Image (spheres, helix red, strand yellow):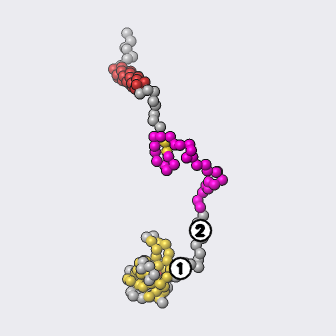
Amino acid sequence: MAKSQQTFSKSEKEKKRLKKREEKRKKMEARKLEKEESGGESIPFAYVDQFGNLTDTPPDPADKIKVKAKNIVLGVPKKEDIEEEEFDPIRKGKVSFFDSSKGFGFIIDTEDQEKYFCHVTGLLDEIQENDQVQFELEKGHRGMNAVRVKLI
């Protein structure tokens, strides 16, 4: 005589599947009853006013602003060219600290009192502390660096 094909694990899986189906049917019926009780209202709408705020009232059609398609600009606006005459790349300053054994120091700009890093590779002349120098700025890893430094 042949053995039954229904095992314990198969019957347990079938029970779980039937239980899930029954729970799903109950939830669906509960949603239907809730919808009937609330008067047929579905999901509430949210509107956006002209200032970008969310509201529950629809916008007034009289406040609508018409925009012509030709007035819409797509893309990034071009930068205005900086006039080279106004910007003087050569600056003047005073050496506040310089360690020749380590090969770096700092220069304080006389115009805006900013402190700039200076490396020995950016020097044209030998400098020491309290020397008056002229230099140019260049973007470095941690900010602006003084390069092409020479004594005044």
Mark number displayed over residue 55? none
* Image depth: mark 1 or mark 2 in front: 2
Question: How far across and down, in percent of the image, does residue 81 sit?
Answer: 60, 70
Residue at 39% from the left image edge and 86% from the top image edge:
129
Q: Is residue 82 left or right of residue 40?
A: right
Check the image and report above or below for 30 versus 94: above
Any part of residue 24 in sight: no
Q: Residue at x 53, y 79 (%)?
A: 89
Return the residue at label 1. Answer: 89
| Front-most of residues 40 and 139 | 40
Q: Residue at x 47, y 84 (%)?
A: 92
Residue identified by numbered label 2:
80
State the separation of the CA atoms marked 1 and 2: 19 Å
Image: magenta residue range = 49-77
Across and down, in percent, residue 136 comes to: 50, 80
Compared to residue 130, the image places residue 31 above or below, namely above
Magenta span dominant secondary structure: loop
Quadrant position of the N terminus in the picture = top left
Label whose residue precedes the other's in the sequence (1 or 2): 2
Q: Check the image and report above or below for 112 versus 29.
A: below
Of 103 and 45, which appears nearest the observer? 45
Is residue 68 rendered magenta in the image?
yes
